[in-house]
Amino acid sequence: MLRRSRFSELVARQLGLFADEERDLLEEARQADAAWTNASRDDAEERFGDYQLVVDTVAERLYDLRERYATGLDEDTATRYRADFDRAARKRFPRFASFLED
């Protein structure tokens, strides 16, 4: 039997709001990825740098979102919340969530 985590609904709402509030940044990341993927050999390194800057910004904002909530919890609960958040973020935003490790 599968159990939902204690924080699954909260994290789903947080990530949904993140997607809405950061729509422009997520679109910028998509466009930067496309520019890098389609860049000529001469331009690929620069386009990758542009892409990486946007990815880092998205990752930082995900991290900040997670930590703003986690800091209000006791240590054990915060650890469980972070694990639930990270799991859901990796599923919803796989390109960005790999940077969540502190």
Image (tube, grey):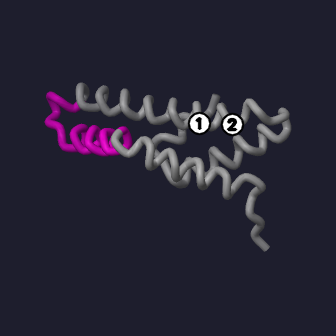
- The quadrant the C terminus occupies is top right
Q: Is residue 8 above or below residue 94?
A: below
Residue ID for mark 2: 69
Q: Residue 38's spot in the image, x, y percent?
A: 19, 43
29 displayed left or right of 59: left
Asked where in the image residue 67 lies, by quadrant, the reply is top right
31 displayed left or right of 17: left
94 displayed left or right of 31: right
Cβ–Cβ under 8 Å for marks 1 and 2: yes
Residue ID for mark 1: 65
Q: Hey, what amino acid is under mark 1?
A: Leu
**Looking at this rendering, what residue extends furthest in the bottom direction?**
1
Q: Is residue 75 above or below residue 92?
A: above
Residue under the image location 82 percent in, 41 percent down: 77
- The quadrant the N terminus occupies is bottom right
Q: CA distance from mark 1 to mark 2?
A: 7 Å
Residue under the image location 22 percent in, 32 percent down: 44
Q: Residue 64's spot in the image, x, y percent?
A: 58, 31
Is 53 colored magenta in this rendering?
A: no
68 displayed left or right of 77: left
Residue under the image location 78 percent in, 44 percent down: 80
Q: Residues within 10 Å of mark 2 (few under 14, many from 20)?
A: few
Specify start and end residues of the magenta stretch as a single range: 25-44
**In the structure shown, which secondary structural element does the residue marked by tag 2 occupy?**
helix
Towards the viewer: 39 or 55:
55
Q: Main secondary structure of the magenta part?
A: helix
Q: Hey, what amino acid is under mark 2?
A: Tyr
